[in-house]
Structure formats: structure tokens, C-alpha cells
């Protein structure tokens, strides 16, 4: 059902993929920041 809505409603499709892209970007930044924090902690020890 959701797939059909995304298939036929261009505005919904654009909004869905913008949301997906925004969540992906936030996740990527979170992982990079945590990785740097982890790397600094292991270097200090």
C-alpha cells in the first residue's frame, strides 16, 4: 500500500526520499563523531 502511494504520488515520493536522506545523513554524522571519540580515547590510553 505504501509502495503504491509512493509510486503514484510524486510529492509523497519526494518527501519520503528527502526524509530518508536526512536520517541517513544524521546517522552518518553520529557514527563519525562517535568513531572519532572512540579513537581519541584509545589513543590516550
Image (tube, rainbow, N blue to C red):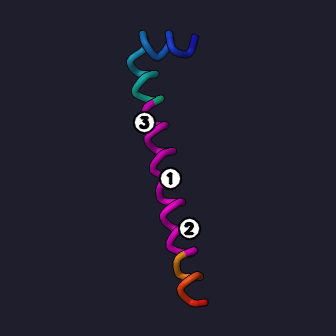
Q: Is residue 15 above or below residue 35?
A: above
Q: Are marks 2 and 3 in contact (CB under 8 Å)?
A: no
Q: Is residue 20 above or below residue 36?
A: above
Mark 2 neighbour class, 10 Å CA radius: few under 14, some 14 to 19, many 20 or more:
few
> Secondary structure under badge 1?
helix
Q: Earlier in the sequence, mark 1 or mark 3?
A: 3
Name which residue lies at 51% across and 14% down.
3
Front tag of 1 and 2? 2
> Secondary structure under badge 3?
helix
Question: What segment is highlighted magenta in the picture?
Answer: 17-38
The secondary structure that dominates the magenta segment is helix
Viewer-closest of 9 and 2: 2
Q: Earlier in the sequence, mark 1 or mark 2?
A: 1
Viewer-closest of 4 and 42: 42
Mark 1 neighbour class, 10 Å CA radius: few under 14, some 14 to 19, many 20 or more:
few
Asked whether 35 falls inside the magenta stretch, the response is yes
Asked whether 13 falls inside the magenta stretch, the response is no
Q: Earlier in the sequence, mark 2 or mark 3?
A: 3
| Residue 32 on image: x %, y % | 48, 64
Alpha carbon separation for disc pair 1 and 2: 12 Å
- Provide the residue designation for mark 3: 18
Alpha carbon separation for disc pair 2 and 3: 24 Å
Name which residue lies at 42% across and 10% down.
8
- Provide the residue designation for mark 2: 34
- Provide the residue designation for mark 1: 26
Amino acid at each position: 500500500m505504501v509502495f503504491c502511494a509512493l509510486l503514484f504520488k510524486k510529492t509523497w515520493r519526494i518527501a519520503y526520499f528527502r526524509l530518508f536522506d536526512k536520517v541517513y545523513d544524521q546517522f552518518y554524522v553520529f557514527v563519525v563523531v562517535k568513531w572519532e571519540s572512540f579513537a581519541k580515547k584509545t589513543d590516550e590510553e
